[in-house]
Amino acid sequence: MTLLDFLHLVQRSWRSLVVIVILGITAGIAVTVAVPPLYQAQSELFVSVLARGDDTSQVVQGSSAAQQKVTSYVEVVRSASVLQPVIEELHLDTDVESLADRISATSPANSVLIDISVLDEQPRRAERIAAAVSQSLAHVVTTELERPSEGGPSLVGIKVIQPPALPKTAASPNLAKNLALGVVGGLALGVAFVLLRHLLDNRVRSREDVESVTSTPILGDIALDPAAKASSLIVQTDPRNPGAEAFRALRTNVQFVDLGGTRRAFTITSALPSEGKSTTAANLALALAETGAKVALVDADLRRPRIADMLGVEGSVGLTDLLIGHAELDDVLVPWGLGGLRVLPSGSIPPNPSELLASEAMLQLVESLTRDHDAVIIDAPPLLPVTDAAILSRLTNGALVVSAAGRATRPQLRSALETLDNIGGRALGIVLTMRRRKDRAAGAYYAYSGDAPRHISTDAPDRGRRAADEPA
């Protein structure tokens, strides 16, 4: 995974990342509020070793000996020999182990200083404990640990050079520190969540996801357009929109598919509902019709028809009435717009859609439409819920399978393509829809199809416009 891929993942999951960071900050605040405040008192001691003579070498040896001993005295600070007298002197309600957990001792490198720090819930008691520990350490070292065997005073001296002061503010919890830890922890957990979700996510989102499932060529790449909800017919309502250009590029690519076939009829389907197949079918039909071609758009989704509503035509009479012999083709095939597009609505929803679409009447209808039109676009139901689209793909050149980014999983797309193969149909190409792609120049989401089959070059919008002048 490249840095750019990672940034795309973060951009896609930024809401989750923000929520986790906010939870981390909340946790930091909660810890600050819940933990009782602790006050810190500190004292500093100076350790010296008396020289046995006045010459310089003896003094140097004494200083070096003091530095060596300081390392050991740092450990002695938290011993029972030092702390038990402190507990008895101050009448503390604790034991040596608990008191040692609240005391720390350090020594700067190459020095003879010992810094003692005490944490306590009461500032006054913290000050008293720090002072008592300092005195107890000096007493233990000079009278027990470093007492000469032949008697006399100890050569080691420990003096308090910085007595503890009464702490004014609590040393912990530290709100700023806890907030910083909350932010860092939240970011770490958020990034881990984003990466884990990416690893577990098997939805089709990119070209690479499609190519991992099938070798079927990708014929189109249609971006997610927020304006599409207001008007699905982007080719007609906003011809200069990059999304409209993407449908024209799809039209160009479709013209190169199945060049040996005598029919120019295509089934538009998808693995699951709500992947944009009806929108793709309508816009592809419009893009073909604007070249001057005669195009028939058939709504064969006899379960959830949308074409009539999308194009604003009367859909109460249509395909079903034609198939059962209650209407003639010329009566239900509706001219639309100023070009050569004609629309065949679905008509009333029948109880037996699969049987109607697999009938001899449907085959004869497709053959009739193909004879009289340059291209026939059939909007069919999704492949996984029902087999209607697979049946229709056998009556046409094949199926264009629409796959919306983040909708179907890779196994579902694979299963949909296998459904086509099992019934004798075939997938001519994949059309990616609802994809987000950042246009760095314009700073907006756009779509332009460079996803033609390997032997087709569609590397510039001008190329698509020139192809638009060719007959469909």
Image (cartoon, helix red, strand yellow):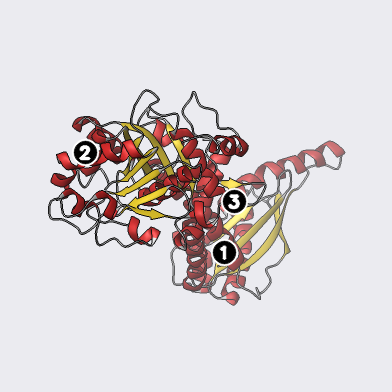
- Where disc 1 sits, the SS reads helix
Q: Quadrant of residue 66?
A: top right
* Residue 94: % across, % down: 44, 68
**What whole-number distance in Å separates the C-alpha atoms at marks 2 and 3?**
38 Å
For mark 3, what is the residue? 240
Q: At label 2, which amino acid type do we have?
A: Gln
- Where disc 3 sits, the SS reads loop
* Residue 470: % across, % down: 53, 34
Q: Residue furthest right?
A: 55
Residue 179's disc is 1
Q: Nearer the viewer, residue 404 or 41?
A: 404
For mark 2, what is the residue? 364
In the image, residue 366 above or below residue 457: below
Which of pointers 3 and 1 lies earlier in the amino acid sequence? 1
Q: Which dot, 2 or 3, sits closer to the camera?
A: 2
Q: Nearer the viewer, residue 452 or 437?
A: 452
Residue 27 visible (yes or no): yes
Q: Residues within 10 Å of mark 2 (few under 14, many from 20)?
A: few
Is 168 positioned to the left or the right of 431 in the image? right
* Residue 116: % across, % down: 63, 59
Q: Which dot, 3 or 1, sits closer to the camera?
A: 3
- Where disc 2 sits, the SS reads helix
Q: At label 1, which amino acid type do we have?
A: Leu
Q: Residues within 10 Å of mark 3 (few under 14, many from 20)?
A: few
Q: Nearer the viewer, residue 212 or 67?
A: 212
Residue 447 visible (yes or no): no
Is 373 positioned to the left or the right of 48 in the image? left
* Residue 321: % across, % down: 19, 54
Q: Residues within 10 Å of mark 1 (few under 14, many from 20)?
A: many
Q: Are marks 2 and 3 in contact (CB under 8 Å)?
A: no
Which of pointers 2 and 3 lies earlier in the amino acid sequence? 3
Is 387 positioned to the left or the right of 469 in the image? left
